[in-house]
Image (cartoon, grey):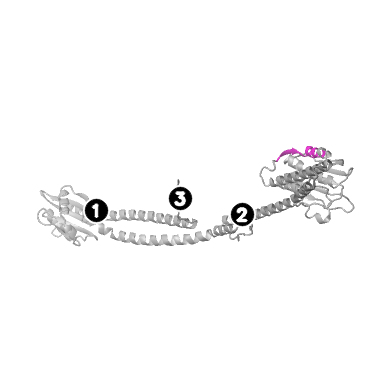
Amino acid sequence: MRWRPTVRISVRQRLTAAVGLLSAAALLVVGATLYVIESRGVEQRVEDAIAQEVDELRRLHAEGVDPETGVPFASPDRLVTFFLSRNLPERDEMLWAFPQTGQPSFVGEADPVLARSTAFPRLVRELAETGGLRDLRIAGERYRVAVQPVTQGAASASFVVTSDLTAARAPLRELMVTYSILAALSVLVIAAIASWLAGRLLAPVTRLRDTAHGITEGDLSGRLEVTGNDDLTDLQRTFNAMLDRLEEAFASQRRLLDDAAHELRTPLTVLRGHLELLDPHDVQDVQSTRALLTDEIDRMARLVSDLLLLAKVERPDFVRPETHDVEALTLGVLERARALSGRAWVLDGVVRGSHVLDGQRITQALLQLAENAVRHTDVGDEIGIGSRWHDGSLELWVRDAGTGVPDELRERVFERFTQDEQAREGFGLGLSIVTAIAEAHHGHVMLDPATPGAPGATFRLVLPGEGPA
């Protein structure tokens, strides 16, 4: 079982922590780099100062003449003592004369740590013959020690330069302490600003969450107030559009269920009533009731089939577009329609070319329009079927010379369960199915305006396209 943290950390807190950690890491790297560079600079300045003192002594030793008397130095001790009397050491630096015999002397600020140390004289004795540069640690203090031997015949002395590296680095340490304090304050300020900015940037997401929490199955009216002009603004618009689609879908489902319940209630009532009044001993009554109940069951089966078809509209595989020959499709619909009833079926017109569409669904829609035309016409009346290219779209139509569509129904004739009071059969779902098929092809269905003195109605499927191919 995987362990999951119980503490909830918000995105705002994560962003703030990430920005704070990144800022702290960047300042830490800058501080470490600064310390290394400055530390090397301090050591380089110390070494340069020591090298300068040693070079000056070497030049004086090479000349070998006492500037005061104009004669050679009497001894190495005299040379080193004279050099110390003429030079002023740098800060944190001491110049030492270790004679061949006797106690050493120095120039500079006295350092009690070196004065009491036994390691310092021992190091000088080790380098008395060869000379050199060494580091020495005494009581936690670090010194840079340079020893330069001075010989004259059999006599020898040592010139020693010591520099307190710990003291030389003191200003750098103070600088780094100041830098650390400022860096810590900077991280806090950056984190505070990052938290404020994250809150501002994530405000649309917070409103989206609150809106989503406030939405229930029965109330989808909540909407986000769209602000700004960035990716989050697009998210707000997309969320509002999603709510619009959901609200429309839920409302459509509720209407569909209400209408289906209403439509099914009538045949069920008929079934119950006839079964209650049925005389089982009367053969004729049983046969007539059986025929009536069978007809009602067929009507309910057709209603359920139509409702299932409408429920599939939102599925991505509702239509499967392929390239079809429009002329063959139009003639095929006409041939199938001739079997519906004894009407005068005519071909109004046909277009040659191909179009990308679902041939079965378009055929289904046109046959549904043909069935509607049959319901509103009598035997021998003319019904026309045709196709054409018009204004960059493919139009397929069914025209009849029947009773036409009443004016009061023309605005809502495509709504579900809408039908003329004089309709002979059906549930008013046919045009809804045709509309769903047309919209699945990114087109629409239209009813031609009524023409004074001209009977019947013309329904057209308008499918967008690039023209005949």
The quadrant where residue 378 appears:
top right
Dot 1 amino acid type: Ala
**Side (left or right) of 128 relative to 17:** left
Residue 305, x across and y down, in percent = 73, 44
Crowding at dot 3, Cα within 10 Å, few <14 / some 14-19 / many 20+, comes out as few
Residue 193 forms part of the magenta stretch: no
Q: Are marks 3 and 2 in contact (CB under 8 Å)?
A: no
Quarter of the picture containing the N terminus is top left
User: Farthest residue toward the front?
Assistant: 281
Dot 2 amino acid type: Thr
Crowding at dot 2, Cα within 10 Å, few <14 / some 14-19 / many 20+, comes out as few
Q: Residue tagged by mark 3?
A: 4
Label at residue 185? none
Badge 1 marks a residue whose secondary structure is: helix
**Side (left or right) of 73 relative to 216:** left
Residue, x 49% and y 56% (percent of image)? Answer: 11
Label at residue 238? 2
Q: Residue tagged by mark 1?
A: 51
Mark 1 or 3 closer to N-term? 3
Residue 324 forms part of the magenta stretch: yes
Of badges 1 and 2, nearer the viewer stands 2
The quadrant where residue 331 appears:
top right
Q: Which residues are magenta?
A: 321-334
Residue 441 visible within the image = no
Quarter of the picture containing the C terminus is top right
Residue 364, x across and y down, in percent = 76, 42
Dot 3 amino acid type: Arg
What separation in Å lies between label 1 and label 3 (alpha carbons)? Answer: 64 Å
Badge 2 marks a residue whose secondary structure is: helix
The quadrant where residue 235 appears:
bottom right
What separation in Å lies between label 3 and label 2 (alpha carbons)? Answer: 32 Å
